[in-house]
Amino acid sequence: MRPFEGKKLLILGGNAETIHLVKKANELGAKTVVASLNPESMAKQCASIKYDIDATDVAAMVSLAKQENISGVLPGTDDIFIPAYCKVCDVLSLPCYASSEIIEVFGYKDCFKATCERYGIHGVPEYYLDLSFNPRDLARIKYPVMVKPVDCFSGIGMTECSCEEELRPAVEKAVSASKAGRFIVEKLMTSADVGLYYTFKDGECSLSCIFDRYTTSEQEGSGRVALGNIYPSKYMDRYYERLHENAKRLFKAMDIKNGVLLIQAFYENEDFYVYDTGFRLQSEASNLLIEHVCGYDQRELLINFALTGSAGSLDLQSVDDPGLSGRYAASVWFLLRKGTIGEISGLENLSADSRVIACVQRLFEGDEILPSWLGTEQQVMLRLFLLCASKSELAEAVNEYQKKIKVLDTNGRPMLLQGFDVMSALEV
């Protein structure tokens, strides 16, 4: 079925993960118009029309939308485009799932944590510090800490600090990465890391999946990039006891009607401490698992809303299944060291494996991994989604692919970072 024949959808941004949104819109019959400064961006490869334009430039996007007679607008899988998305839709009177208040809260870590606290949702403890580096403020800081920009995600601009000498360059890095010029200094958390992924439709909120995240500690001083997620989280029952009702009160107060939202939190001492969020489709593509298990596609809901103002007739509560009906799933991330990819092997016959439900590859032979990418999701080559009937079967599948998939640089040296300990993660 191609319900959107003759309609044009403008998509802001063209990174590798956005390609799946473009493909879905194409399948539904829409003409996709992708705007991105990068002429080689992957999402442009399957777009109907492509423009090498800064998608955060609101005036340029409005002009482009009028020129192409655009019917709807959506952001890609990068938070940087959300403010422009909201403003462009406002100027053109097109459907928008965000609002200025939502952007303020979910686009800035400091605003997000402060807002959550008002609804009984705790944020990661932080230390007050400004650019004056007041000695009294410095004396109160207990190391180790994490320094972050308030408005960057995917590890960008983040630094772990173990002493005061490391603090100043970390702050400079964070401020330089932040469009708002703001940073926060948080307690470095090493406890369990939990992801909460919600779907909203016509004011209804549903937890679509919940997972435990496992990160690399192999890159000292850098942001801790994920090595894999396990679904469902072992803390799911505690989430419903402690956090779910408070989260629903927050969402209702903010008048969230439609969209998808990720909230990340640490679990420590029987409580959750939120630290990050994203009001958009996620680059880690949990929507692919949701589609396989629950039978609906978050991308399709967003496209429907963008082009018609309605997300459709789906009853979320009747289809969402964060417990996966007793099954277990994993998204396995393959991270690369710096260098140029010479050879990738082990990806043959994935479609023949019933345990594999999706494979999202973003780097290929000949691509260069720059030093500045380390500690960010830019060093992710591949995300592999696996779904199995039991913990032991999933552990076996993850270990099999972590051994099977290999990446060599142009000099024949291994590029993959060490994978995560799935036996420990699943407690098998």
Image (cartoon, grey):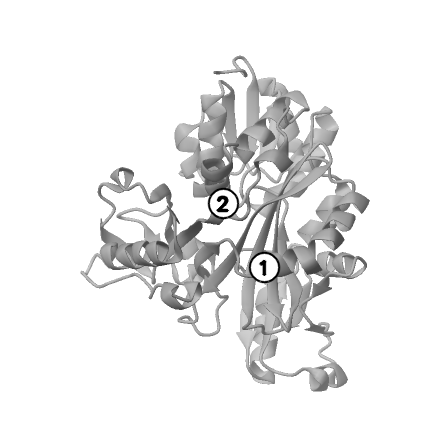
Indicate the position of residue 312 as horizontal and vertical percent values: 63, 24
Indicate the position of residue 237 as horizontal and vertical percent values: 61, 57
What secondary structure is found at the residue carrying circle 2? helix
Question: Is mark 1 in CB contact (under 8 Å) with mark 2?
Answer: no
Q: Nearer the viewer, residue 329 or 84?
A: 329
Above/below status of 152 relative to 280: below
The amino acid on which the numbered mark 2 sits, given as a three-letter code, is: Ser
Farthest residue to the top: give it: 6
Q: Is residue 6 left or right of residue 394?
A: right
Name the residue at 54% across, 67% down: 192
Distance Cα–Cα, label 1 vs label 2: 42 Å
Above/below status of 241 relative to 220: above
Indicate the position of residue 323 as horizontal and vertical percent values: 53, 49
Above/below status of 141 relative to 270: below
Q: Is residue 158 visible?
A: no
The amino acid on which the numbered mark 1 sits, given as a three-letter code, is: Ala
Q: Is residue 49 left or right of residue 96?
A: left
Q: Which residue is mark 2?
A: 325
State which quadrant residue 332 falls in. Answer: bottom left
Crowding around mark 1 (Cα neighbors within 10 Å: few <14, some 14 to 19, many 20+) is many
Above/below status of 400 relative to 58: below
- The quadrant of the image that shows the C terminus is bottom left
Q: Is residue 32 left or right of residue 99?
A: left
Q: Which residue is mark 1?
A: 177
What secondary structure is found at the residue carrying circle 1? helix
Farthest residue to the left: give it: 412
Q: Nearer the viewer, residue 277 or 94?
A: 277
